[in-house]
Amino acid sequence: MTRRFYNWARTEHCTPASFQRPSSEEELVAIIREARRANKQIKVIGARHSWSDIAMPCVADCVLVSLDNMQALLEVDPARGRVRAQAGIRLHRLNDELATRGLALSIVGSVVEQSLAGVVSTGTHGSSLVHGNIPSFVVGLRVITGTGEVLDIAEHDPLLPAARVGLGGLGIITQVSVRVEPRFQLRETTQTVSFAAALANMQALARSAEYVKLWWLPHTDTVMVFRCERTEAAGEPSKLLAWIDRIIINKLVFPLVLGLGRVIPRLIPPSNRLVARTYLDRAPRVGRADRILSLAMPPRHRETEYAVPLEHAAEALRQTRALIERSGVRVNFITELRFVKGDDAWMSPASGRDSCQLGAYMAAAPGLAGYFEAFEAAMRALDGRPHWGKEFRATPEDIVRMYPKAEAFAAKLRELDPDGVFHGRLLTRVFPRTPD
């Protein structure tokens, strides 16, 4: 029976001709060579957490591949601060495996359900001007190209900056080597500031701790500042409070509020103000770093996100508020500002510059499409670059303008995948191929 696959947000789906769960590189090589011989596309799906079409094929007659049977931690070198893992390992599992060995990733994103290959391919990030995104910690990759060739890409290989944030187009990643550090604890504190104060002090706020992020609930005048600093204090967040957040708030209360707002949109602004006065007023927390930095899975919603140069962060937030007020749309989800140290990956949204990655989020409600379209236009005008795993409408011309290495990356796509075996929907949109 043919199975339809959806992403988590149900913004994209496909119905492949076959679904494969290989357990070895040899099986993957055979799958790739057979697909190439039969002129079929292959796409790898991880946790399906991307809102964009990055994991979707262009045609129905395709092969969908899961790396769920390839989740082993292969090598741990505490002295050098390196670990090597199979690419299908989920981030939460990797965090736990590292913690038992006294190690940790220096940065994680808000969600830890994704596969390691997925976070590397899409440029997944946390929030810190001390640390880059997760791919910036990659020191080696093992990749099977579109011809079935197995490549070992080492730390100083000139191909590595192209393969970090490779968008799933250079080949199937089978192993990832990353830099790690000794396990550490974080203490999270929160502060509420006025919207005007957030704009006026944006640069200082962004650098006010090792890990900093900002939340603004549209239709309110307050911004919540989250700061995390290292601590020697022992302890973990309350399991009861974590359960309440995960089950009661995110699976019961929050969906109920969102559903009510869909039916009666005029209730969204006052409900946002209520949430800003209550739920966002949090007590300090101490715990294992990855547990403090990550969040419970929220209710299903839509996301678009752009990385603007850090110096444009305040203006990006100001324009987001202005377009909401101008359009009259009722936005029922937070707007999030996270800060990311620049890196050298060719297609990283933070390539070559420190960035503010500003996310516009919204659960299904009237005006969503227009809001996202206006937001994207405003961010592009501020030299913004889209998050590859979230919804965006940038054109091929936009991508070439945004990324100095875009044309070089397109050449690598043709070199390592000459027949377009991995050239799915997103890559076809932004790197269209013309017959030779």
Image: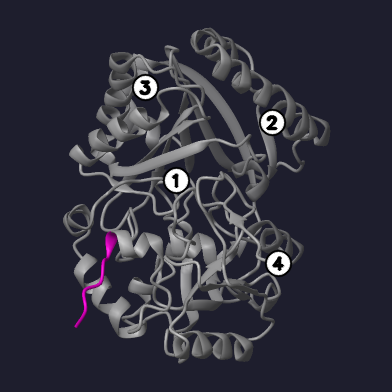
* Residue 29, position as x, y percentages in the image: 55, 89
Residue highlighted by disc 4: 1
Circles 2, 1 touching at the beta carbon (< 8 Å): no
Q: Nearer the viewer, mark 4 or mark 2?
A: 4
Q: Which residue is mark 3?
A: 198
Q: Which residues are magenta?
A: 430-436
Q: Are marks 2 and 3 in contact (CB under 8 Å)?
A: no
User: What's the magenta bit mostly, secondary-structure-wise?
Assistant: loop
Q: Residue furthest front?
A: 1
**Label 2 amino acid?**
Asn
**What secondary structure is marked by label 3?**
helix
- List x then y, in percent, for residue 432: 26, 66
Q: Earlier in the sequence, mark 4 or mark 1?
A: 4
65 up-or-down from 231: above or below: below
Q: Amino acid at mark 1?
A: Ser
Secondary structure of residue under mark 4 = loop
C-alpha span from label 2 to label 3? 27 Å
First in residue order: circle 2 vs circle 1: 1
Q: Are circles 1 and 3 on residues that touch, CB within 8 Å?
A: no
Location of residue 412 with respect to 351 vertically, above or below: below
Looking at the rendered image, the quarter that the N terminus falls into is bottom right
In this rendering, the answer to whether 315 lies above or below 84 is: above
